[in-house]
Amino acid sequence: MKAIELYDLVLDTPNEIFSPNTLKARIALNIKGLSYETKWLDFFQVHSVIPTITKTGEKPTVPVIVDHQHDDKAVQDSWEIVKYLDKTYPDTPPLIHGNNEALQFFFYNYANANILVPIFKLCVLTVVEKCPTKEMQNWFRQTREQSFNMTLEEFAGDDENVHVENIKSGLGLVHTTLKSYSYLSGEKPGFSDVTLAALYKMFSVFRSDLFEQTLLDAYPDDVLRQWWRRMEKYTKHSPPAEAVH
Ligand SMILES: N[C@@H](CCC(=O)N[C@@H](CS)C(=O)NCC(=O)O)C(=O)O
């Protein structure tokens, strides 16, 4: 058993990394060079297994990590996980540097509202198709339609170009920032880079047809492409060799 277990979400393809929330925890572990074992759960298993691990009564979601080096501590929620890892493993690269916690939290919320939403609109129908059983497809559809208060087709909309344009506009200040800095957080990646890379990865998996034009070539230079080249290596199943201590 590895020191840390990461609970991640699986659809119809074993070992496929796609979930924007679990990706934040995974990318953080990979930047920090911490070794971990992935435990894959489908949506139904999230609801049956996660409460037995967290024992908090919180709504069951992934990511959850269990840290066997620290009294089998279970931590739920990507933001809480990254704060926990920064605090518990101070010798690893910090992701919420110095006193900028609120600023990192701001970008996380900004990205969810302005970049994740149009990305999710372009991905949601693929997610339904990739739920491995009819029962899970129906469950996913019902729960999302209830929370969006419309059908998934209405949520996805008719014109994909509108969402592509909204993503471009959401990335405008990201692009401006990355013209001056290697990472959104400065010279080293921080939680804002983790958040954005999670969205890039999800889109590359579900919409490989639109990925390059929408997220890499949104602006007529290679600024976004170079940033993704620096970040992509942290979106894999384990830390890149140079990150491992
Ligand atoms: N704020 C949470 C959100 C976690 C979340 O919503 N995770 C999704 C997977 S991407 C989930 O577990 N969903 C379970 C469900 O829809 O019932 C975080 O950042 O960890």
Image (tube, helix red, strand yellow):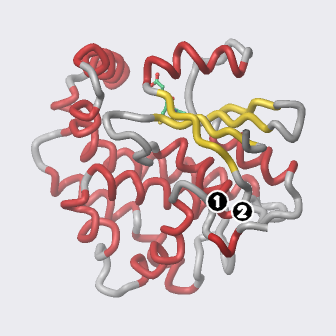
Mark 1 belongs to which amino acid?
Asn
Tell me residue 227's x, y (percent).
49, 76
Q: Is residue 244 above or below residue 58?
A: below
For the residues bearing labels 2 and 1, Cβ distance under 8 angstroms? yes
Q: Residue at x 86, y 41 (%)?
A: 69
Q: How many marks?
A: 2
Under circle 1, the secondary element is helix
* Residue that appears at 70% across and 21% down: 53
The quarter holding residue 156 reads top left
**Who's the residue at 54% across and 42% down the image?**
22
Q: Is mark 2 within 8 Å of ligand 1?
A: no
- Mark 2: secondary structure: loop
Residue marked by disc 1: 30
Above-or-below relation of 216 to 170: below
Q: Is residue 127 above or below residue 175?
A: above
- For label 2, the residue is 33
Percent position (x, y) of residue 203? 34, 54
The label on residue 195 is none
Residue 43 point in image, percent of width and height: 43, 23
Quadrant assignment for the N terminus: top right
